[in-house]
Amino acid sequence: MAAGFMAVIVVLGVVVAVAGSGSESLDDSAPPVPASPLGAGGGKPLGCRPTDTSQQVPVSAPLGVTWELFQAIALPTSATAGPLVRQGGQRSCYARTPVGAMIASLQISARLTYSARWKAFLAHQVVDGPGKVALARERAGTGASPPLPAGGVAQVAGFKFITYGPDTAVVSLLTRVDPSTYVEGTFTVRWQAGDWRLELQPDGTPNAAGRKRSSLSGYVAWGGA
């Protein structure tokens, strides 16, 4: 998993500075929040009313996005695109929009990788398939990845959409390793049971690793640290 999730790349000297963020406990005792916002009778739970409706793929950094710390990783959050349902370390309820999909890809992959409650994320926020089976098998013996060291992790620096539709989004995220080195990673999320779910690679990693780059060229600058 460490090789598959871009944010695990350890880089000494990177300082995380996040506006509007808060640290979170790795050991979340709250019950899991299902990925689907649909409640009894087809209603949505309290607080799950995304107001972002734009289907236009963003060509600049989305407005209204703030960043929160999950361990040492800066993760995006939006009052209009989600996640709008928060319970301990759990996050769900994203807008069915490009911005909602992009935020979901980062939130789900980071928490799936590092949360002590990875089983809840795997059950409720991951698409069924070979990758889900592979990760469950691997984690049965290893558990979650170790906590990240503060100030020693690469952070998201940019994005570009590969494809987007109301049911599937594929987005490439660029992570800054040092001032002149970036690493690509491509994430896929699918709209299932009323929310975005992460589709894992066949080997269980959350994203398809790409090549190293020396600049943000071709990507939209976007990040919280």
Image (cartoon, helix red, strand yellow):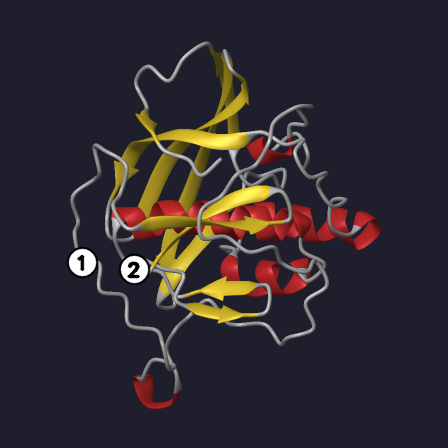
At numbered mark 1, what does the secondary structure look like: helix, strand or loop?
loop
Mark 1: amino acid: Thr
Residue name at image x 27 percent, y 60 percent: 80
In contact (CB < 8 Å): disc 2 and disc 1: yes
Residue name at image x 57 percent, y 46 percent: 110
Q: Relative to 53, is 16 on the left or the right?
A: right
Q: Position of residue 90 (x, y in %)?
A: 55, 65
The answer to whether residue 5 of the structure is visible from this angle is no
Q: Nearer the viewer, residue 175 or 112?
A: 175
Q: Position of residue 159 (x, y in %)?
A: 36, 31
Q: Position of residue 34 (x, y in %)?
A: 50, 71
Residue 53 numbered mark, or none? 1
Residue at label 2? 95
CA distance separating discs 2 and 1: 7 Å
Q: Nearer the viewer, residue 47 or 39?
A: 47
Q: Relative to 128, is 8 on the left or the right?
A: right
Q: Quadrant of residue 2?
A: top right
